[in-house]
């Protein structure tokens, strides 16, 4: 599990360490400098997304002279394409964007390390204040200092274009709201220049966070310079794993500066973790409800219901799927396939006969008949019941209303067999008449969540949901009582406990029917842990995040870097689960 710490939690963790004289900033700055040196030594093409990598020459700095304004000038920069120069940092150029606080301090101390390694480093002070010791260390190492007030923003752009690497050290966890002038204007212009320059833009490394993101909520309230890499200190921050801000952080590297670990120790290991692979040992000493987390394969393996020798198909969980109509039969095939291939005891399908026949052709394991189930999957491929939705639902709305009554406990126990978890997707999202329990999992995409929230009286559209997913997912959870899973490139899940932000799927996953497969996978998980889910109100969110991880990994496996058909995601699920359980 990867835990993100809010800015308050970071402060609480660092206070006693600073009071004890732990050199947090020195550790942060050293690790940051190492990251920059690795980046520069690897050359400009390294680590970029493949489309950005093509044809970009390695930059070699021949001479490090500065213009009269103290900034490196484009005209004096020469580039050469020669593999033999990889690993050379001497003479390479770094441009530091430096803010008034400790984030700027980290950046200046790191800059001093870079100067000592032979790099030509210029710091642009964006504010009248700067971290005093950091500035003194940078100057005495031989770094060049200019102030934004003295030079014009365009010359900063030119200098950036003439540099090998730009460090964004304007603000860190002390930031509040959108970047204010003059830093805001500077960053807006730099971001535009980066967009225009494409491959010619230097590697950009964000210090702790890309300045201007919402540290705690992942919003992007103003201009932000997108980073290729973020070197973050002590712990992940929510904005580094939540959309939309996480999309601006590039690859995130976590540096241990000595925060408490799971075991409660404060020993500094000097270790650096990349966020993509592996686990990190950081975890809050006091895991507060509502923490933003990212689940990893080992966490999913612990949750996955694996049959024991004493199990049979009924004890393993029966999933009931009410999906598809004669107009949208494919959704029924995809949802039942997702459910079957995730490994339940049984999948039942309820719907029009013609659709049931198609389901059977694709998945003969499915039982097309009513009976007891341990979890429902409701709504894929079923039209909504709003004024704009057509009436032609082949009786599916009626069936869904009946199942929903079981989920919400409106029907008596002897009819339903007790409380029933459910995945509530697509058309079923328009059929909610009662407050829901946490074991009901709503699975909207941003447009569907906006509609749901509008129905609850919120003035919100799809774009607003996409701008502040965490806020709106939490709002929807509070308003409905249900666990809410908002689908997207980064899927956000909020229930009564922690929030999960999962980024497991390749972008090819955003294809018709892929969400239907996810609904089926989650249905199997809820059925397999049906009794636990109604006992532990935080479990549904964990199972939902687990389903998202498996769905995303199955999509990655099916895609292998190329296009993807939704049914192939379902087909890849058994191998993904086997990998997780065997790891
Ligand atoms: N947490 C830790 O363990 C460590 C933290 N360190 C660094 O310290 C940083 C936090 O430092 P600070 O608390 O000094 O705060 P920051 O350096 O993040 O920023 C605060 C400064 O930025 C200004 N500011 C705030 N919001 C702004 C906005 N919207 N637009 C423009 N300016 C704004 C404030 O006036 C204040 O002067 C971390 O992000 C990290 O880089 C490191 O030194 C190492 C250890
Ligand atoms: N850009 C993207 N990158 C990765 N995954 C995505 C992206 N866009 C959407 N997805 C995923 O694809 C699936 C789409 O589901 P959904 O919108 O319900 O489509 P459908 O209803 O056609 O099945 C979800 O799991 C979502 O998280
Ligand atoms: K920063």
Image (cartoon, grey):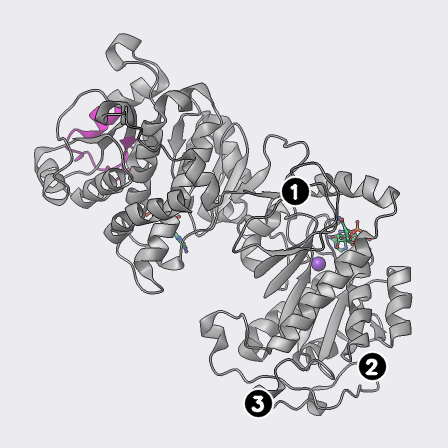
* Circle 3 Cα neighbour tier, 10 Å, few/some/many (<14 / 14–19 / ≥20): few
Q: Mark 2 points at which residue?
A: 70
Looking at the magenta stretch, what is its main secondary structure? loop
- Of the numbered discs in the image, which one, if any, rests on residue 82? 3
Callout 2: CB less than 8 Å from ligand 3: no
Indicate yes or no whether the magenta region holds residue 393: yes
On screen, 391 above or below 65? above
> Measured from the top left, where is residue 333 in percent x and y?
19, 43
> Measured from the top left, where is residue 384 in percent x and y?
28, 35
- Of the numbered discs in the image, which one, if any, rests on residue 5? 1
> Measured from the top left, where is residue 214 in percent x and y?
64, 49
On screen, 191 above or below 489? below
Res 416 → quadrant: top left
Measured in 3D between alpha carbons, the distance from the residue under mark 3 to the one under mark 1, in whole angstroms, is 42 Å
> Who's the residue at 73% across and 53% down the image?
172
Do we see residue 439 in this rendering?
Answer: yes
Residue numbers of the magenta segment = 377-401
> Who's the residue at 55% across and 34% down the image?
498
User: In terms of sequence position, does the residue under pointer 2 or pointer 1 come before the other?
Assistant: 1
* Circle 1 Cα neighbour tier, 10 Å, few/some/many (<14 / 14–19 / ≥20): many
Asked whether disc 3 touches disc 2, contact meaning CB atoms under 8 Å apart, the reply is no
Q: Residue 223 or 258: which is nearer the viewer?
A: 258
Task: Tell us which disc is closer to us: 3 or 1.
Answer: 3
**Which structural element holds mark 3?**
loop
> Measured from the top left, where is residue 49 in percent x and y?
49, 69
């Amino acid at each position: 599990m990867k835990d993100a710490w809010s800015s308050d939690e970071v402060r609480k963790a660092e206070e006693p360490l600073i009071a004890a004289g732990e050199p947090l900033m020195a550790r942060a700055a050293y690790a940051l400098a190492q990251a920059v040196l690795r980046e520069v030594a690897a050359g400009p093409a390294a680590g970029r997304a493949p489309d950005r990598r093509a044809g970009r020459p390695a930059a070699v700095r021949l001479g490090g002279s500065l213009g009269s304004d103290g900034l490196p000038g484009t005209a004096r920069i020469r580039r050469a394409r020669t593999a033999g120069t990889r690993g050379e940092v001497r003479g390479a150029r770094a441009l530091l964007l430096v803010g008034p606080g400790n984030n700027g301090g980290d950046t200046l101390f790191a800059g001093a390390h870079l100067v000592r390694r032979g790099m030509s480093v210029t710091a642009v002070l964006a504010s009248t204040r700067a971290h005093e010791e950091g500035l003194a260390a940078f100057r005495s190492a031989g770094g060049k200092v200019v102030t934004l007030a003295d030079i014009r923003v365009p010359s900063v752009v030119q200098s950036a274009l003439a540099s090998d690497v730009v460090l964004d050290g304007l603000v860190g966890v002390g930031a509040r709201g959108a970047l204010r002038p003059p830093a805001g204007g500077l960053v807006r212009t730099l971001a535009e220049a980066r967009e225009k320059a494409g491959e010619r833009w230097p590697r950009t490394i964000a210090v702790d966070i890309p300045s201007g993101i919402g540290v705690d909520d992942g919003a992007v309230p103003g201009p932000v310079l997108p980073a290729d890499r973020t070197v973050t200190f002590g712990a992940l921050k929510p904005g580094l794993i939540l959309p939309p801000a996480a999309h601006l952080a590039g690859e995130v590297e976590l540096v241990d500066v000595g925060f408490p670990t799971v075991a409660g120790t404060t020993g500094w290991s000097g270790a650096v973790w990349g966020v993509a692979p592996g686990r990190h040992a950081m975890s809050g000493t006091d895991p507060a409800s509502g923490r933003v987390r990212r689940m990893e394969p080992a966490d999913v393996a612990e949750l996955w219901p694996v049959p024991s020798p004493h199990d049979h198909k009924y004890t393993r969980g029966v999933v009931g799927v009410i999906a598809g109509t004669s107009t949208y039969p494919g959704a029924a095939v995809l949802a039942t396939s997702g459910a079957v291939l995730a490994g339940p005891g049984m999948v039942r399908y309820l719907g029009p006969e013609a659709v049931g026949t198609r389901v059977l052709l694709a998945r003969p394991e499915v039982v097309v008949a009513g009976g007891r189930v341990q979890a429902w999957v409701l709504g894929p491929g079923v039209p909504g019941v709003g004024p704009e939705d057509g009436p032609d639902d082949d009786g599916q709305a009626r069936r869904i209303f009946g199942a929903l009554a079981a989920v919400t406990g409106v029907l008596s126990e002897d009819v339903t067999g007790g409380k029933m978890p459910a995945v509530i997707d697509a058309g079923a999202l328009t059929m909610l008449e009662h407050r829901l329990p946490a074991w009901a999992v709503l699975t909207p995409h941003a447009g569907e969540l906006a509609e749901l929230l509008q129905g609850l009286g919120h003035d919100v559209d799809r774009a607003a949901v996409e701008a502040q997913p965490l806020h709106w997912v939490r709002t929807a959870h509070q308003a409905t009582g249900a666990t809410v899973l908002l689908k997207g490139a980064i899927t956000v899940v909020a229930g009564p406990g922690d929030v999960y932000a999962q980024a497991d799927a390749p972008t090819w996953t955003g294809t018709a029917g892929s969400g239907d497969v996810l609904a089926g996978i989650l249905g199997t998980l809820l059925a397999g842990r049906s009794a636990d889910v109604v006992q532990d109100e935080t479990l549904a969110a964990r199972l939902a995040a687990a389903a998202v991880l498996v769905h995303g990994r199955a999509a990655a496996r099916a895609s292998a870097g190329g296009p993807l058909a939704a049914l192939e995601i379902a087909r890849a699920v058994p191998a993904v689960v086997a990998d997780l359980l065997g790891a």
